[in-house]
Amino acid sequence: MIEDQRSPDRDDTLAEAFRSVAHQLRRISVESLAHWEVSPSQSRALRTLTRHGSIRLSELSEHLRIAPRSATEVVDDLQAKGLVQRQPDPQDRRATLVAVTEHGIEVGQAIRSAQGTEAERLFDRLSATDRAHLARILRKLRI
């Protein structure tokens, strides 16, 4: 029997395969964060602060696309772990900046390394050519 290439099942299968791989990557990420007792949202905040340097909470919430109240909770948790610190904004005494501590930089690097190693294990199932094609396709789909 010849399969219809335009079948709705084809799209569902592709979407489901994509969701499955995304789920695997999220699971890998969560598992690698457990060692440091850091949540995925805390990891994203740490990565954002490392990339952008000292920024206001409102700016952090914009980068993370979360409510300012949620950003405050994430920063509170990171500060309790010694990974970030609040400091006065020299431009506006009423405002506070959030910055990564040296310990936060070390933990962030360790997290990225662990997640990268685990993700590489997943993608090692692909040939170099397939990896290049997948990277090109994902860049095209990225918003």
Image (tube, rainbow, N blue to C red):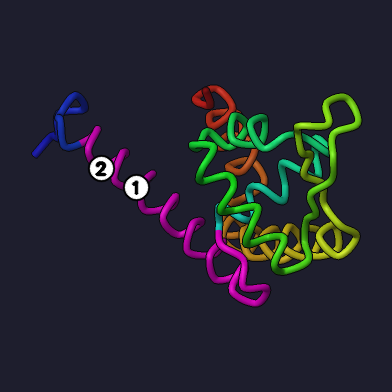
Local packing at callout 2 (Cα closer than 10 Å; few below 14, some 14-19, many 20+) is few
Give the camera-side residue of 101 and 69: 69
Residue 102 point in image, percent of width and height: 91, 60
Residue 11 point in image, percent of width and height: 24, 32
Q: Which residues are magenta?
A: 10-39
Give the camera-side residue of 58 and 21: 58
Local packing at callout 1 (Cα closer than 10 Å; few below 14, some 14-19, many 20+) is few
What residue is drawn where x is 68% and y is 73%?
36
Q: Which residue does the numbered mark 1 point to in the structure image?
A: 17
Residue 48 point in image, percent of width and height: 71, 41
Give the camera-side residue of 8 and 92: 92
- What is the secondary structure assignment of the residue under circle 1? helix
Is 96 placed above or below 38 here?
A: above
Is 17 placed above or below 138 here?
A: below
Q: Tell whether position 24 is magenta.
A: yes
Q: Tell whether position 33 is magenta.
A: yes
Is 85 placed above or below 68 here?
A: below
Q: Which residue does the numbered mark 2 point to in the structure image?
A: 13
Is 75 situated left or right of 9 in this image? right
Pointer 2 with pointer 1, Cβ within 8 A:
yes
The answer to which image quadrant residue 2 occupies is top left
What residue is drawn where x is 22% and y is 38%?
12
- Which residue is most to the left? 1
What residue is drawn where x is 71% and y is 51%?
46
Instruction: Quadrant for the N terminus, please.
Output: top left
The answer to which image quadrant residue 119 occupies is bottom right
Look at the magenta stretch and give its main secondary structure: helix
